Image: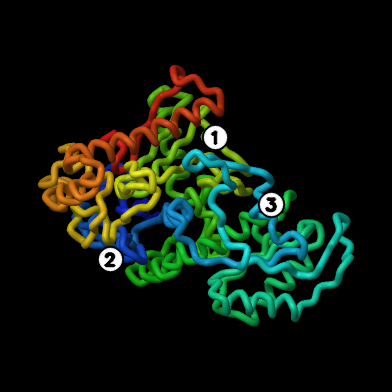
Amino acid sequence: MSSLRFGVDVGGTFTDAVLIDGAQVWTAKSPTTANFVDGVIAACELAAERAGSSLAEVLPRVGRFGLGTTAVTNAIASRRGVRTGLLITKGFEETLHLSRGHLVETDLRMDHGFEIMALRDIAGIDERIDRHGVVIKPLDMAGAVAAARQLVEDGVEALAVSFLWSIVNPSHEIGVAQAIREALPGIPVTAASELLPVAREYERTTLAVLNSYVSSACAGVEVLAERLADLGLTAPLLLVHSGGGTISVPEAKARPVWLAESGPAAGVMAAASTAAQAGASHAISCDMGGTSFDVSDVANETPSRVTRGELMGIWTALPRVDVESIGAGGGSIGWIDARNMLRVGPQSAGSRPGPVCYGHGGIEPTVTDALVVLGYIDAANFLGGDMQLDREGAVAACKALGEPLGLDAEAAAWGIREIALAEMTKAVRTRLALRGLDPRNHALVSFGGCASLF
């Protein structure tokens, strides 16, 4: 049997690879690329090189290749999904915007929070099925397809279909989804009842919309599988899903939203195992990467799980390891809001252009830039010397940000760090408070590229 194992995590800023043979471990880190495939290959090549071999020689001996990715998580957290349209039962067009009365505080104001789509991108379809599955209003298939076509002509890039009581009788919903796929073959279409046939139309609809919203986030997975196969990988490429297990590439293509919290879920599973080995059955896991900060808890060596709840500010149904993510990572951008106050995130510079200190064209200061200015990161010894950082560029960017506030570069950098730290502290304390957890009984398991700096 093949003795080697590859584990890869695609973060918003870096891609990490781990190669093991049961006795030795080789690790590598490479900047995450725009299509993420090149970054994965580069990290794997470096890990194989450190094992004294080449990737082409290593891959045929790999018995398991697992991939965790924050691509979908980051698309939701940074609000960078594709423009999505929704076909819903006529009369219920404002279901998502009413948010079941759910309100959040934003800059001292109460609102419904992030709205995945605008009302203009929602079309009411004149059909109706009752709770017994009986058709009350027959479906006008031609009209439904015409409505979808109009949404696409208006600029929509993906579609979701969610009708009332489709969990009892999905014929209308699945029929419309299939007709749209045939009429508009280049447009991703999600039928809510196919994705997750659960009661409560709000949660079911939001999940279907999110699935379409992130449809382009993992577009390179198939390409990656082909590239790895060409290089000699015979084992299937497995992707970590939100529940901490794995799914195949075809499953991920059809249901990309299942990869939400993929990387974080893998991290929590590892944190639970590590804590148990250290004799701590209860733990709080904190994962700080380049784009997000992810918090979860472990009780009796078992990660906390949910079947529905808030996913990065959006209430939806998604069975998953219960991870709370906020936009506070190494690449989170510092900025000044309308009140002339310093803010950090949720927008991230990613790896391209990345933080200013990377020298890839970034102009907005990030948490990483602030850490370089403050001396927490040695610009001459980043990644063990694999990458040189531009400290002068980071200083200039922090200085430019702080000038309107009367702050020099160091003061602005300190402000960025303190705000990021405050947001992380708030996330952990909220987790403890909402679940009634006693911090004295929990170990803190910290991991991720930036975690040790906080």
Q: Which residue corresponds to mark 2?
A: 56
Q: Is residue 386 visible?
A: no
Q: CA distance from mark 3 to mark 1?
A: 23 Å
In the image: residue 238, left or right of residue 339: right
146 versus 361 height, above or below: below
Identify the mark at residue 304; answer none if there is no mark. 1
Mark 3 surroundings within 10 Å by alpha-carbon count, few (fewer than 14), some (14 through 19), many (20 or more): some
Q: Earlier in the sequence, mark 2 or mark 1?
A: 2
How many numbered dots are placed on residues in this image?
3
138 versus 360 height, above or below: below
Say which element carries label 1: loop
The residue depicted at 45 percent of the width and 51 percent of the height is 77
- The colour mode here is rainbow
Q: Earlier in the sequence, mark 3 or mark 1?
A: 3
The residue depicted at 43 percent of the width and 48 percent of the height is 263
Q: Which residue corresponds to mark 3?
A: 202
Q: Quadrant of residue 127?
A: bottom right
